[in-house]
Image: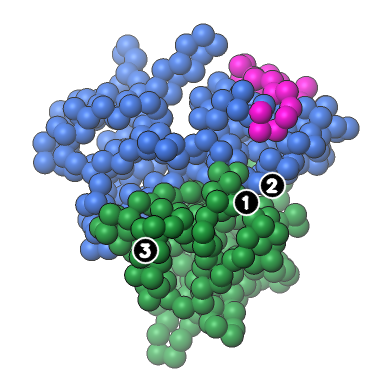
Chain colours: A blue, B green
């Protein structure tokens, strides 16, 4: 059996069912190249009482190996958040289903629904976008377009921030960095989506005891130390009074 | 302390952190009027070793009582799914934050990210809609409008199905019932969103061992017995080949 298991958002966010399953597995792998798990390998080891192997390389290179093993053994593959939210992991599920390897997905919390804690209503979110780190000769403005389209339709936008995880280095975009990049897009596109009066929601290390949610104008957010990653932003559409009520407590 | 705790999608979906917290709480309430928890009160009692009180009435009527208690004791309020996805529960968080009652939200899996298991990419979902049970002199076509707008923007639509939970009765809309209602909307609106060739994704009792995902044309879905609730649908936008790859295994 191949288990694709979500670690959820924050420490201890994996489910009771996930924990029970992990204790019975023959091999446990932790995906650590598309994100940095908020629950570390040591804590996971202590929790499950099992040895956990961290995978650093791209999962696609490991798929055959993992699935061959899963035909006869119970193999767990752990992923931060809810496992299929990162598109890269659906290839594992495709390969398992095609090769008739029995497979179960064990879900957990995801930033997609965790953001509802700020007060914005889930059903009013439109397309999600990601702000990438600028690269030489490549500064896509697709996040600006996504926000503009959502605004026009009266929908909130979840703005994820880029992550670069290499074997020896980790780089997470912070909220102040993202604001700087978005303001640059404003200069190019000029639809007045980002002005000093624009109020966004900044969310940092959700699910941790000291998680931070701030609803404030851009210049304030740009100066706020949100602390440890991961960070994300929400660009709110026109607010319902009930949304405003909770949002303004942050 | 007031703990707002998600039960997640499927049995055993609550998080390890939630379970540890529940064991230390002075009082535990289970919300059972906006949804039917997939983990029953008996299983939750066995899991936590604690007595659990089921709340049948509207939470708003109980807010003062709950929060007064939470000023001095550890009070847990459990909700199916991720707790703030249902808009009714944000009023609890507002009241807690306004009255300076310390409060923690413990998240869990939500249908909003669980649907990614069908293969559709999360970031390509637009506004979510709900198909309500028809009432005399009231047949809203807002779901049709939401799907049309998302299609135009190339976005998938999560279609939630109505739930009516009373003190003595429970009623969940099934996928065949929802298709009948959506086809009625087609007759009125006529934008050719629903034809016998239209293929939707039907998802039923996700997170359970016998969860069911079917990607098929309307007439097939309308005749499928999806079994126990809850059910939901996804109206896919134009598919990326990677999405198609997983979707077509169902």
Identify the residue under disc 3.
B67
Question: Residue B250's x, y, as percent?
Answer: 71, 51
Q: Is residue B133 left or right of residue A241?
A: right
Residue located 33% across and 49% down the image? A118
Of residues A114 and A43, the one drawn nearer to the viewer in this rendering: A43
Q: Is residue A228 left or right of residue B114?
A: left
Viewer-side label of 1, 3: 3
Q: Which mark is first along the chain, 3 or 1?
A: 1
Identify the residue under disc 1.
B13
* Residue positioned most to the top: A168
Q: Marks 2 and 3, Cα distance to the nearest angstrom? A: 30 Å
Identify the residue under disc 2.
A17
Residue located 34% across and 70% down the image? B64
* Residue A33 lies in quadrant: top right
> Does residue A246 appear anywhere in the picture?
no
| Circle 2 Cα neighbour tier, 10 Å, few/some/many (<14 / 14–19 / ≥20) | some
* Residue A137 lies in quadrant: top left
Q: Which residues are magenta?
A: A46-68
Question: Residue B125's x, y, as percent?
Answer: 45, 49
Circle 3: element type = helix
Above or below, B22 relative to B27: above
Counting every numbered tag in the picture gives 3
Circle 1: element type = loop
Q: Marks 2 and 1, Cα distance to the nearest angstrom? A: 6 Å
Residue located 31% across and 41% down the image? A213
């Amino acid at each position: 059996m191949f288990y694709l298991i979500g670690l959820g958002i924050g420490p201890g966010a994996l489910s009771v069912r996930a924990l029970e399953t992990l204790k019975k597995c023959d091999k446990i792998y932790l995906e650590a190249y598309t994100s940095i798990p908020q629950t570390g390998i040591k804590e996971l080891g202590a929790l499950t009482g099992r040895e956990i192997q961290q995978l650093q390389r791209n999962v696609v290179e490991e798929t055959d190996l993992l699935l061959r093993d899963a035909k006869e053994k119970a193999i767990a593959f752990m992923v931060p958040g809810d496992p299929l939210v990162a598109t890269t992991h659906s290839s594992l599920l495709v390969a398992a289903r095609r090769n008739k390897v029995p497979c179960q997905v064990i879900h957990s919390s995801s930033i997609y629904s965790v953001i509802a804690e700020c007060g914005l209503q889930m059903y009013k979110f439109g397309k999600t976008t990601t702000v990438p780190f600028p690269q030489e000769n490549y500064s896509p403005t697709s996040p600006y377009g996504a926000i503009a389209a959502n605004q026009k339709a009266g929908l909130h936008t979840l703005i994820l921030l880029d992550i670069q995880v290499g074997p020896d280095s980790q780089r997470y975009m912070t909220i102040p960095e993202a604001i700087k990049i978005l303001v640059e897009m404003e200069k190019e596109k000029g639809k007045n989506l980002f002005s000093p009066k624009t109020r966004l929601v900044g969310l940092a290390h959700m699910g941790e005891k000291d998680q931070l949610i701030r609803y404030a104008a851009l210049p304030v957010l740009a100066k706020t130390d949100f602390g440890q990653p991961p960070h994300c932003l929400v660009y709110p559409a026109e607010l319902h009074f009930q949304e405003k009520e909770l949002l303004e407590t942050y």
